[in-house]
Image (tube, rainbow, N blue to C red):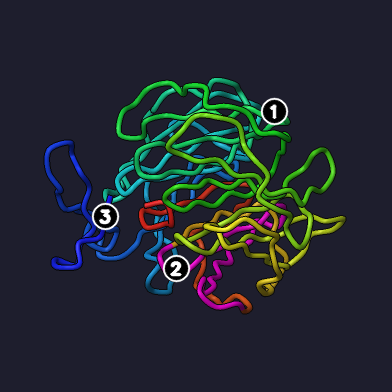
Amino acid sequence: MRFNTDSSQMEIYDGNQWIGISATSGEQQTGGTRGFFAGGNSTNIEFITIDTTGGATDFGDLTTTFWINKCSASRVRGLIHGDRPATTNIDFITIAQKGNAADFGDLTVAREDCVGVCNGTRAIFMGGGGVNTIDYVTISQTGNAIDFGDLYQHTNHNASAQSKTRGLSINGANPGSSNIIQFITMSTLGNSADFGDSANAGYGASGCSNAVTAVFNTGNNGSHTSTMNSVIIPTLGNGVFFGDLSRTFYGPGTAASRTRGVIAGDYPSSSTNIEYVHLATKGDSIDFGDLVSGRGHWGGSSNGHGGL
């Protein structure tokens, strides 16, 4: 791969010649980066346009009730995975088109709250339910997950974040509050490795990221907290304090664009709060709008996060 200074374009060698790398964006497909939230002990799916502010809109319904679940996404598809009681269910939606979810396939191991990351080609599911399993699917093709490797320490109710190359599993319960951050290289197979430690341990966390910065709530650290931490994904190192949410959030759904991270919902209060942060600058969250219905312990993602 190289950067052509004459054309100001990234190029890749196909074995015979250098060709330009083309890409589409969430903005081109939906008029703005679309975030979605799903599950939370219901079949409901809601969506927002992350680049604006305002209330969420009904998207459609899942094939079954999901609870204590997470989500992942490519530019085109959103996946919903993990459930209590533990199942292997994976549902999918087409993000640009409102409508009901369909069955995608199955995880290799039944579990709740398995976090997902995606580089546009692979969606990878890490941990959840007290297991150290990492498995993956090719997101453009429906089918069952395949073994990827193992987390070096299993976690549950953890957060995730991604760049184009790295997937992060952050904090979680093991069985108490953990501050461990683990990472994988998404284009390869293998076990996770140590990234660093977050500034605050916690579980019931969720994360959002662009290609550089990951921001995640702490969740529960003896009690529910409003604290957010951040890490720089391309480097290894410890997390730092980012700012505070306006209230405590536990088990929220999260989604991201290139500039914003969005946090929505809460357990057990079933809050309708949606808040956002500017990923490039540390600071407290800002009001975004409200969900159609209050829920928590659910998942969210977008067609414009840092892995795409």
Q: Secondary structure at mark 3?
A: strand
Identify the mark nearer the N-term, 3 or 1.
3
Q: Give the Cα distance between marks 3 and 2.
A: 42 Å
Please name the amino acid that badge 2 sits on: Gly
In this rendered view, identify the residue nearer to me: 244 or 48: 244
Q: Is residue 53 left or right of residue 87?
A: left
Q: Residue at x 70, y 60 (%)?
A: 238
Q: Pinpoint residue 34: horizontal percent, then vertical percent.
A: 36, 59
**Are dots 3 and 1 in contact, CB under 8 Å?**
no
Q: Give the Cα distance between marks 3 and 1.
A: 40 Å
Identify the residue under disc 2.
Answer: 55
Q: Give the Cα distance between marks 2 and 1.
A: 36 Å
Q: Residue at x 63, y 64 (%)?
A: 230
Viewer-side label of 3, 1: 3
**Placement of 280 over or under 57, stated as above or below:** below
**Placement of 43 over or under 220, stated as above or below:** above
Q: Quadrant of residue 99?
A: top left
Identify the residue under disc 1.
Answer: 131
Q: Is residue 242 left or right of residue 292?
A: right
In this rendered view, identify the residue nearer to me: 98 or 205: 205
Magenta span: 257-282
**Magenta stretch: includes residue 290:** no
Identify the residue under disc 3.
Answer: 2
Q: Pinpoint residue 65: horizontal percent, then vertical percent.
A: 53, 34
Identify the mark nearer the N-term, 2 or 1.
2
Please rate how many residues cluster around mark 3, counting C-alpha atoms within 10 Å: few if below 14, some from 14 to 19, many from 20.
few
Please name the amino acid that badge 3 sits on: Arg
